Image: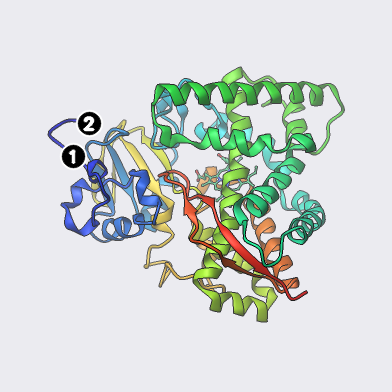
Amino acid sequence: MSAAFTTTASEPTIVDPYSVPIERLDVSDPRLALDQTWKRYFERMREEAPVHYLKDSKFGPFWSVTRYDDVVAVEDQPQIYSSSWEHGGITILDMQDLGVQLRMFIAMDDPEHAEQRKTVSPALLPGEIKKMAEPMRVRTAEVLDALPVGVPFDWVEHVSVELTTRMLSILLDFPWDERHKLPYWSDWAANIDIGTDPVLNAERERIMHEMAGYFLKLFGERKAAPPKGDLISVMAHSEAMSNLDYQRFLGNIALLVVGGNDTTRNSMSGLVYQINTFPEEWAKLKANSALAANAAVEVVRLQTPIAHMRRTALADTELGGQKIRKGDKVVIWYNAANRDEAVFPDGDRFDVNRENARRHLSFGYGIHRCLGARLAELQLATLIEEMLKRGMEVKYASPPERLSSCFLNAYGRMMVTMTRSV
Ligand code: HEM
């Protein structure tokens, strides 16, 4: 960072966003996630500078897009706003700066993106997901029935991580006894807040190669066996993905592991945050369990597990009255757009009856929209339904601990006490 310019992220403590000139606001400061100060930062940006330029930061200069319509406009023009790893990829941290470049299809433009997406998408179609519904319900029940009653435990570890890992193991047909490797790899793959730190990046690189090695073996086994419905077998028997180079193989495996993992996990923890913050909404669910599906969608809106995606402008263009130049880094903040009052009145409120909850942008929009959205929603709705069946009340035993990240809205620990009437 140049000596002449400081951002709010260079202050020793987090500053009130209204106390500084707006051009200094740095929403990439990972500390903003700890107590959700980003809400007020984005509130000011949406109001005063919805397409905001920060000329210097730990991640270099970048635009922040914070209003709903502008985020949609960026995602709707993939020919101008590139996702490609060749230009830096999909996070605020430039992929070129990393030893391991995850060349996954989420970080590609068409036509290569479309070919690979087409390969994976049949395994996640509604018909396939329907087949997973019953085993998912059984596994959810098992996990809930194993929880201690009246004794504090960590909801993140015992419910969110456990259920998500089980869901993903089924999707990938991953060796059951080794399934706990999945969240470990996922945590490292998604940790972009380590920035360009050489020591941590070397460790991340080592772990990513370990993951690739494991999956290469699985891939080889599935290729040699007749095709089955799991995602690894589908990839191994496809034209577009059976002979990927190493970086693309590693990237796509990381995409499936992280895509399904942190996101669903943090939505399950987000559910407990919402019902502790808005107990009256839990009461509505108890009175009418048919609201579970909409409540699941509303939780995903409020949690926004992936806070941002990044694009790179391929040409000079204009957005919200601002001139974007070719090569500029454009960060679209889903957590800001999901609280845009123009679309979601009283946007910070958990409202199980919210009519347009489904319009949220947590799953993105356009050609890269999340392929696992239905699966994640089903898992969350099933969790809510099974909790209701058991008359469960889950209350904080101590305040939840959030992780400091500008990429994931994530919980480290959430100590709760549970009672049940059934
Ligand atoms: C609550 C849970 C989830 C959230 C919030 C979420 C969020 C996202 C977001 C924001 C994107 C990028 C969208 C864009 O650029 O417009 C994405 C893409 C993707 N997600 Fe998810 N995701 C979730 C669950 C899952 C699951 C369970 C899977 C299954 C393994 C999955 C697989 C993918 C894949 C493969 C892509 C890339 C799509 C493409 O580039 O065409 N996601 N997800």
Residue 374 vertical placement versus 341 (above, below): above
On screen, residue 221 versus residue 366, left or right, reads right
On screen, residue 318 versus residue 125, left or right, reads left
- On the rendered image, what quadrant is the C terminus found in? bottom right
Write down the residue under mark 2: 1
Q: What distance separates the C-alpha of mark 1 from that of mark 2?
A: 8 Å
Residue 415 vertical placement versus 365 (above, below): below
* Residue closest to the far front: 151
Return the x and y of residue 12 as percentages of the image width and height: 24, 44
Q: Judging from the image, what secondary structure is the residue with disc 2 in?
A: loop
Ligand 1 - quadrant of the structure image: top right
Answer whether residue 389 is visible to the viewer in this image.
yes
Write down the residue under mark 1: 6
Return the x and y of residue 325 as percentages of the image width and height: 26, 35
- On the rendered image, what quadrant is the N terminus found in? top left
Q: Residue at x 74, y 25 (%)?
A: 219
Mark 1 belongs to which amino acid?
Thr
**Neighbour class for label 1 at 10 Å: few (<14), some, many (≥20)?**
some
